[in-house]
């Protein structure tokens, strides 16, 4: 029951590894994701991060409900648990790297909250999506709800939250909850292809785009950080390299500087 990390060239991988419980996220897993992202963020050669669940049965079937008797037994315990969850979402949203969710099977509750904090989401045809909070008398958090509304709009978000029903991968695609759907057997190859495309693009440009989008999406977004990221592009060596490569009709070699 852990979070595993590995690096494959310019791509970092985070694996939610609790297969006995369909990768349900326990407290230790919530606490492990922020330092994993911090390590990736500090690696200058890393260009993007992919999050997936172990195996192919589930991305994550939500938070580990078996912990709730203890994790939510007091206001202090609730604050600690919610703080770990918030730190995870902030680490994903605030990373300068683009973060992709690769989704097989169940993506429920807290698992969908993690996926929504990612920049891009790609699902196999087995993907199933739900937020069953209304069936458990749980208040879905402000941050996760904000991301849901920003992704699918308030009308769809109300239906998802109020009914708690499951959406299959094709319906999720039709409302913009995921960016693409492929056969399960082709999903990893597709995600690796997209991650490789991102890794070849100018990292400072992607960082700027992410900072601007996050500022727009988040209530009280940090536009000063976004503007600084845009200005950094204009004065970068990569900007010069991009112009030279265009004029010389060759592939640019971006360094993130």
Image (cartoon, rainbow, N blue to C red):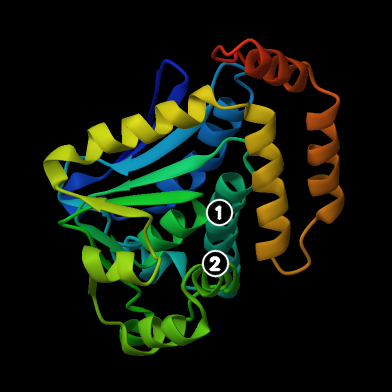
Q: Quadrant of residue 218?
A: bottom right
In the displayed structure, 247 sits above or below 214; it is above
Q: Quadrant of residue 66?
A: bottom left
Cα–Cα gap, marks 1 and 2: 10 Å
Q: Secondary structure at mark 2?
A: helix
Residue under label 2, please give it: 147
> Foreground: 40 or 248?
248
Q: Are marks 1 and 2 in contact (CB under 8 Å)?
A: yes
Query: Quadrant where the C terminus lies?
Result: top right
Residue under label 1, please give it: 89
Q: Secondary structure at mark 1?
A: helix
Query: Quadrant where the N terminus lies?
Result: top left
In the displayed structure, 62 sits above or below 161; it is above
- Residue 153 at x, y = what percent? 51, 78
Residue at screen point 39% across, 35% down: 194
Q: Is residue 176 left or right of residue 1?
A: right
- Residue 74 at x, y = what percent? 53, 73
Residue 138 visible in the snapshot? no
Point out the frontmost of discs 1 and 2.
Answer: 2
């Amino acid at each position: 029951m852990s979070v595993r990390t590995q690096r494959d060239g310019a791509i970092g991988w985070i694996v939610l590894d609790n297969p006995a419980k369909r990768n349900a996220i326990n407290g230790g897993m919530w606490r492990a994701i922020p330092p994993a992202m911090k390590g990736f963020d500090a690696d200058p050669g890393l260009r993007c991060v992919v999050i997936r669940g172990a195996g192919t049965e589930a991305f994550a079937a939500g938070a580990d409900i078996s912990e709730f008797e203890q994790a939510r037994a007091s206001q202090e315990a609730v604050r600690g648990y919610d703080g770990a969850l918030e730190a995870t979402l902030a680490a994903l949203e605030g990373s300068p790297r683009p973060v992709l969710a690769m989704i097989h099977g169940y993506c429920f509750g807290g698992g969908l909250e993690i996926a929504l904090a990612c920049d891009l989401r790609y699902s196999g045809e087995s993907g199933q999506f739900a937020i069953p909070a209304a069936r458990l008398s749980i208040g879905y958090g402000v941050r996760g709800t904000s991301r849901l509304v920003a992704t699918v709009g308030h009308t769809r978000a109300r239906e998802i939250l109020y009914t708690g029903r499951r959406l299959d991968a094709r319906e999720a695609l039709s409302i913009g909850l995921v960016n693409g759907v492929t056969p399960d057997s082709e999903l990893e190859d597709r995600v690796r292809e997209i991650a490789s495309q991102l890794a070849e693009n100018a990292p400072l440009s992607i960082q700027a785009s992410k900072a601007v989008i996050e500022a727009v999406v988040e209530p009280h977004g940090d536009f000063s950080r976004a503007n600084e990221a845009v200005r950094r592009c204009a004065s970068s060596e990569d900007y010069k390299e991009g112009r030279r490569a265009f004029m010389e009709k060759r592939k640019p070699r971006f360094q993130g500087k």
